[in-house]
Amino acid sequence: TTLSAQTLGSLDPRVAVPSYDRAAVRPGIVHFGVGAFHRSHEAMFVDRLLAAGAGEWGIVGVGTLASDAAMRDALSAQDELYTLVTTAPDGVVEARVVGSIIRYLLAPEQPDAVLAALRDPATRIVSLTITEGGYGINDATGEFEPRDAATLADLDGLAGGAAPQSALGFVVAGLRERRDAGAVPFTVMSCDNIQGNGHVARAAVLAFAERVEPSLAEWIASAVGFPNSMVDRITPVTTDASRQRVADEFGIEDRWPVLSESFVQWVLEDSFTAGRPAFEEVGVQVVSDVEPYELMKLRLLNASHQAMSYLGLLSGAEYVHEVCRDQLFADFLLGYMHDEARPTLAPVPGVDLDEYSAELMRRFGSEAIKDTLMRQIVDGSDRIPKFLLPVVRAQLASGGEIDRSVLVLAAWSRFLEGVADDGSALSPVDKRLDELRVAVAGEADAPGSFLDYAPVFGDLGSNARLRTAFVEARALLAARGARGALEALAAH
Ligand code: NAD
């Protein structure tokens, strides 16, 4: 059956469909960046809200990139409906058609419609999953240094009254109209996987507005809420195989379904300036401080992806579940979590960290998710400093264990050299690849000098204990390969 509003009633009864009248849903949220993750996460929570009767919180999706035409075409062919298929670690599969996106606007073709949606007083939240690049914040300095052409064009164009092109440009233009109309501004809610995502969104919007009109920045600073959040649901890229699976298992022809794990988490700070739906009634944890949850996720989940991927790829593995079902790797990861990451975390309200770690291993071990190790290593030079180095830094300061973290750093450096343990070629993907390769080539003459690469290691590279351990770990990997190194570590 081809998915559409007409065919909802005739789908396989195992597929849950919207129980509410979609025609009666009104828009309350404008969302920039309708990708895989938005559709497995926020849109799913909003679908639950709509089913619970909160019909004023429908989503207007917006794409600002030319490449978003593909999503517009897919969704418009099926009345903005799509299938979300989740798989639990025990193999239980659930499918539902999500109905919360009620319109999709492709900004390059209809900028005025996007501005109208932002102007509409019914729009009380503007949410974002525009990836880190969408904010233009240099994460080393915290400065606003946009590089993409659309944002740069908007910085010039907006002051002169041109239509925006970038997500930030639309947000600032929308807020300017609210202020000029004397209206209440919408809340800007980032759902990107960035530490302090609300702070980052606020810094970007304020810096952008400052360049357009300083008094606008002042007004935004005092009037607009930018809640922080921690978001979690592993959602791989949709492939033809995923489309085929939805057709074979559920009989649904969906142009762009989403397949994700069953686990989902959203910890959201309660700072909304124009009201919010009762998120806490549909499974969102609404809290006053998100930071302990973020650190837990960054240092246990995200850092573990780093910890498994370089070693796993060196050893010839391809998938996350493959390495996590291997006792040697599983023990290594749990050891990292328990002995290296956990000592750096403050207590997390309401969370048992042993249980969280055990659940992570079950999630990682889930075969159906087919998450690749290669997906975890894209731009490792961004990920290592955010996920793993804070653990190393804290453990060095307290004299705690660092052996496993250092083996990961050494494995990363070996991975960058591009040769797996069996001699086959590996293909690192990193925006700093050229520089990283130069840095790692220096190891031949000056062991440990890779750690002098300041954009990643900062001042950490000069730490003598780290340096000695790194040189030893690289030698161990060279002599025994990734598996051999894990065995050696397990033995002592
Ligand atoms: P995706 O490739 O499916 O979608 C990316 C989306 O981001 C697209 O809608 C695109 O239009 C938009 N985008 C990218 N660059 C942009 C820019 N410069 N300006 C405006 N929009 C831009 O990827 P995804 O899996 O949906 O991931 C998107 C974000 O979601 C990630 O960057 C991450 O912060 C967050 N996230 C993803 C996962 C996951 O498992 N996939 C988990 C947690 C959080």
Image (tube, rainbow, N blue to C red):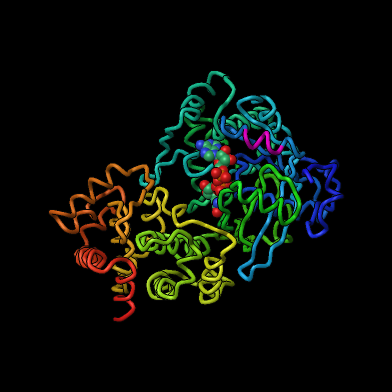
User: Which residue appears at 33% of the width and 51% of the height?
Assistant: 425
Q: Residue furthest left?
A: 445
Residue ID at (74%, 61%):
281
Q: Quadrant of ligand 1?
A: top right
Viewer-side residue, 408 vs 323: 323
Image: 323 above or below 132: below
> Can residue 74 be found in the magenta stretch?
yes
How far from the left and from the top, in percent, is residue 43? 69, 49
Pick the quarter of the image with the C terminus. bottom left
**Residue 105 on image: x %, y %:** 68, 32
Q: Is residue 190 visible?
A: no
Report the predominant secondary structure element of the magenta stretch: helix
Most foreground residue, 88 or 33: 88
What is the magenta range? 70-75
Q: Is residue 317 magenta?
A: no
Percent coordinates x, y for residue 290 in the rendering: 54, 60
- Name the side, left or right, on which 130 lies relative to 416: right
Residue 441, can we see it?
yes
Place of residue 160 in the rendered image (x, y in percent of width and height, measured from the top left): 54, 18
Query: Could you tell me which residue is drawn at 61 percent across and 60 percent down?
Result: 261
Task: Looking at the picture, tell me which residue is in the foreground, 95 or 165.
Answer: 95
Tell me: 101 left or right of 240.
Answer: right
**Left or right: 251 with respect to 260?**
right
* Residue 476 occupies quadrant: bottom left
